[in-house]
Image: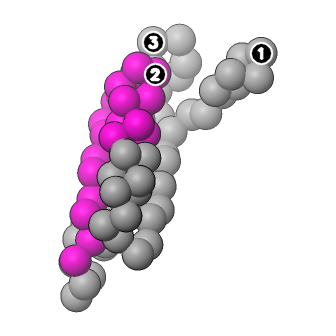
Amino acid sequence: GNNAYESFAPLKQARGDADRVALTLESLPVPFLVTRQADSDRLEMRRAVEAFSNRLAQGTGEVASVYYAGHAISHNGDV
């Protein structure tokens, strides 16, 4: 979850929301690999999504999900 931003007002609950989702998934009776990102900049988010995509390409799981909490913006069609 991203609370802190350089150019936008900070959020109060995005990190907490993401933490609660992660804890819920980790508490399930089935194995669930959870990766958390906190207050990541664009490059860190791109790297995290790339790593997630690479794990999916390995075909090691049956279910995949992405949960993002924070501001989302687009500039000239580029996210």
- Secondary structure under tag 1 reads loop
Residue for point 28% across, 47% down: 36
Look at label 3 and name its amino acid: Glu
Residue for point 44% across, 29% down: 46
Look at label 1 and name its amino acid: Asn
User: Magenta part of the protein: which range?
Assistant: 31-52
Which is nearer the eye, 11 or 73? 73
Going from N to C along the chain, the mark reached first, 2 or 3, is 3
Which is nearer the eye, 8 or 50? 50
Going from N to C along the chain, the mark reached first, 3 or 1, is 3
Residue 8 position by quadrant:
top right
Report which residue position mark 2 lands on.
Answer: 42
Report which residue position mark 3 lands on.
Answer: 6
Mark 3 surroundings within 10 Å by alpha-carbon count, few (fewer than 14), some (14 through 19), many (20 or more): few
Q: Is 21 situated above or below 75?
A: below
Mark 1 surroundings within 10 Å by alpha-carbon count, few (fewer than 14), some (14 through 19), many (20 or more): few
**Residue 39 lies in magenta, yes or no?**
yes
Q: Is residue 4 visible?
A: no
Q: Is 7 situated above or below 79?
A: above
Q: Nearer the viewer, mark 2 or mark 3?
A: 2
**Residue 72 lies in magenta, yes or no?**
no
Residue 32 spot, x, y in % from top left: 27, 71
Q: CA distance from mark 2 to mark 3?
A: 11 Å
- Secondary structure under tag 3 reads loop
Q: CA distance from mark 2 to mark 1?
A: 15 Å
Residue 65 spot, x, y in % from top left: 47, 62
Residue for point 47% across, 55% down: 66
Report which residue position mark 1 lands on.
Answer: 76
Q: Is residue 15 left or right of residue 68?
A: left
Residue for point 37% across, 30% down: 47
